[in-house]
Image (cartoon, grey):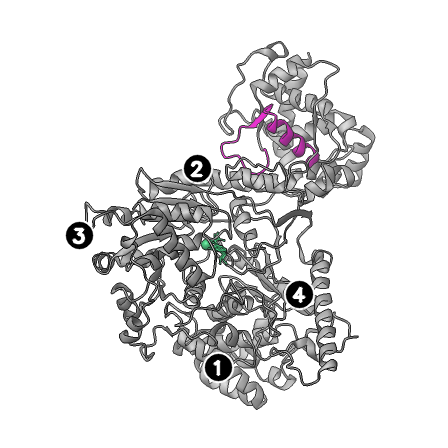
Amino acid sequence: MDDGATEGDVSADRVIAELLDMGFEFDKISQAIGVVGPRRADVLEFVLSDSGNGRRKPSRESQGRHSVSSNAEACSSGRHSVSSNMEARSSDDGNKLANRRRRLKQLSITDHLASNTGCEKGSCGEKAITSYPYLVASNDPGVPISDDMCSALKPESQVLLANSRTESDRRDKISLVLQKHFGFSCVKGFQQEALDAWCAHKDCLVLAATGSGKSLCFQIPALLTAKVVVVISPLISLMHDQCLKLAKHGISACFLGSGQPDSRVEGKAMSGKYKIIYVCPETALRLMEPLKKLAENPGIALFAIDEVHCVSKWGHDFRPDYRKLSVLRENFSSSKLKFLEHDIPLMALTATATIPVRADIIKSLKMSEHTVIVLTSFFRPNLRFTVKHSRTSASAYGKDFRELIDTYSNSRNFMGKKQKALHEINPDSESSSYESPDDTMSDDEDTYVDSTSHVDNNFDKTKVGMPLRNENAENELDVYPGVDDFDVTCGEFLECTQPENFASSSQSNKTSSSSSEIVDQGPTIVYVPTRKQTVELANYLCKTGLRAAAYNAKMPKSHLRQVHEQFHCNALEVVVATIAFGMGIDKSNVRRIIHYGFPQSLEAYYQEAGRAGRDGKLADCTLYCNLMRAPTLLPNKRSGEQTKAAYRMLRDCFHYALNTSVCRARILVKYFGEEFGPDRCHMCDICINGPPQMHDFKEEAVVFMNVLQAQSGQPAEDMGCSSIPRCISGRRRFGEVPNFRVVVSYIREKFPRFATTDRIWWEGLARILEAKGYIHDAAETPRVLIQCPELTEAGLNFLSSQSEEEGLYAYPDAAILLAMNDPKPISTSSEWGRGWADPEIRRQRLAGKKMGRRKRKRHSRNQSTGFTTAKQRLAEILSKRRR
Ligand SMILES: Nc1ncnc2c1ncn2[C@@H]1O[C@H](COP(=O)(O)OP(=O)(O)OP(=O)(O)O)[C@@H](O)[C@H]1O
Ligand SMILES: [Mg+2]
């Protein structure tokens, strides 16, 4: 539901709600409605163009004329309200609005092309789209692509693999098509392995690093036979990008999303007109029968399932429809389809599957028991991983993004000076075909200018946003992006008659020296957890002069496509996105991936970080996160088991961030089950800074573990015995549950020397003891932090066998270091509790601070019912023991 005739009926409230959901600020939306009326497209256009850069501030007059409350009339007649508001604007603005509205209404790639050809000189639309002689079609039945054209464009390099007699013959043919279509001299080892499996008609699971070139494994087969390759892919944006590249490489392709089908493109796809058909899982399931016909004639060479981790419930990006793809193996076997000589091979590919996920993929897709597993190293030697502590709130933007802003500003100033110098040497020389907004600035100008100076008609500046209201809070996260993330449902891309000239560029999206490119530094993607933050941070960066755009799943699909295009043609410096942006994006020169807040898993982190440095050059992957606060699980529908797995993944991610002693690249590849050969990467913050000094935690550990032991009801004499009760939180009597907070506050109260230690410090100690196997979390669903610490047998042994001399040495983690360096309490309650063991402090505090109402109530209730708190109960147990 983007825009349309019914839009005028949409109430202002609904428009407000929708735009709030996208991350825009309430004030801005209501201001827009006041100016342009309640039509969604107009409001959207207003907030987009106004976007905090002062491009078009509403006149007082127009503001006075309309307000949200006075829009009842306008609501019933959106058209009227727009036209009357248009009068209040200049005709120039009116034209811009009309153009923008036209763009918002595009439903097809063709429309999109038509609008992009109008892009100003050298802009991305021209560069990325119109300069390539491929044809596109879409829902629009008016696009003239005849069947003759399709057949005429059949590549003459289409060698029948069946003719290859020997293995070397086959490999020669592979090299030939690789060189001809992609410009690469040889296939990589793992690509060859996957191709060998395909040639042997075997199913294959390809597990290879992000950016390693998995796509070629299923694209080459399309060039080696007369048959078609069907690729299942999770996002339109991903399918679109790949089709676009294939067309440039002289290979015809189409994509079929899950939206309204285009019978023409679909029909041609099912009759074998394209070498490669990209299809989303839903559509693949719908097209079972036509696919069977396709398998008969001209034949299906291969089913490739890209981003196959989406199959697994235990992966980071589960999509239920992926799981139903087992029908492919069931239906396309030689036993089911008698005309098949062999089963049609399945090739499943991903960069982010842990060992349990791999097993789940093979089982769920019912892949053959002879499935070949092609596994390469997950190590990306050019990625430099760093973790930085930050509150990751708006107040920290200035500090955290200073370096990024400086990087682009300096680079632009340098480029500006270089161009100016060139121009002075040769005034007739062709200047930049992209009208850089900065061209309007003098060299001496401060780079932190008001972003009004960056006006660019071609460039839809980022959106502005303000805090979402509380009632929208649960909607503000993109759990996972839907398939149809663009405003086009399908498209066809016919091969260029002349594949791209590889002498000049072996990668279609490689940064060239084209003057139209404004990102000298390579673009940056910043991942933030909420939609609101995409808008907020993008707006902040725009205000500092950067070319930034927000991207989240709730934004108009036309906008999302535009951001993709501008990102790919280097017109954007920064994209601030939720997880909706990222999967499979193959842009060679992304230099920085910044995660501003915890990702939900290391799989997601590695997948998103993998967008960086795909040209093999050095790239930075920096995670900013609040190390003093455990990350929270994003709401999603999960079974009990899935919740446990989700917490486990989040905990691994937290531990990765807190780590102070192990190379980060090592942790990441080990996470995917790989033994890391080089020992360390020599680049990450840990390798560069070295680990902190080891600390002897014995004294605190003994106290902590003794309290746990007392709490579990074990008499001191029993310390050596192995019968530690395996308690399950909730099954025990209240007070016997080993609650971490209760234990820590008890220690701080009873042991004056620990009175000022922070809870965060003890959380760190608990992690160390857990890693050593001395304690475990007895909670039914362990979360990120240890909730119910319980001694293990090894912990009991440690307590009973400890000698005076031996220490318990370990590296303090980042949270312990922060707590030690900055002993300020984190919460006011811990401040209040500090020094509580001292009777004088206690007396003063009780006298000075009135008990809160709730506390007082609870206190009096406990007094009357004889109910004891967990802490009191623990004290009782310990005092009994002492007696
Ligand atoms: N044999 C090869 N030689 C040189 N470059 C290659 C080769 N194969 C692929 N590439 C390049 O590697 C880049 C990444 O390829 P691709 O997008 O297939 O990666 P991927 O493994 O699918 O990554 P992701 O897991 O992030 O989706 C592409 O730009 C491609 O041109
Ligand atoms: Mg890929």
The disc, 2 or 1, on the residue closer to the chain's N-terminal end is 1
Identify residue for label 3. 339
**Mark number, residue 541:** 4
Q: Quadrant of the N terminus?
A: bottom left
The disc, 2 or 4, on the residue closer to the chain's N-terminal end is 2
Query: What is the spatial separation of the Cα atoms under label 2 and label 1, in whole angstroms?
Result: 57 Å
Q: Position of residue 258 (x, y in %)?
A: 35, 62
The disc, 1 or 3, on the residue closer to the chain's N-terminal end is 1
Amino acid identity at mark 3: Phe
Residue 779 falls within the magenta-colored stretch = yes
Q: Position of residue 595 (x, y in %)?
A: 61, 53
**Given the current orientation, which residue lies at the most extreme top position?**
717
Which residue is depicted at the point 60% across and 47% down? 381
The disc, 3 or 2, on the residue closer to the chain's N-terminal end is 3
Indicate the secondary structure of the residue bearing disc 2: helix
Left or right relative to 682: residue 309: left
**Mark number, residue 74:** 1
Identify residue for label 2. 356
Indicate the secondary structure of the residue bearing disc 4: helix
Boundaries of the magenta span: 759-786
Query: What is the spatial separation of the Cα atoms under label 3 and label 4, in whole angstroms?
Result: 59 Å
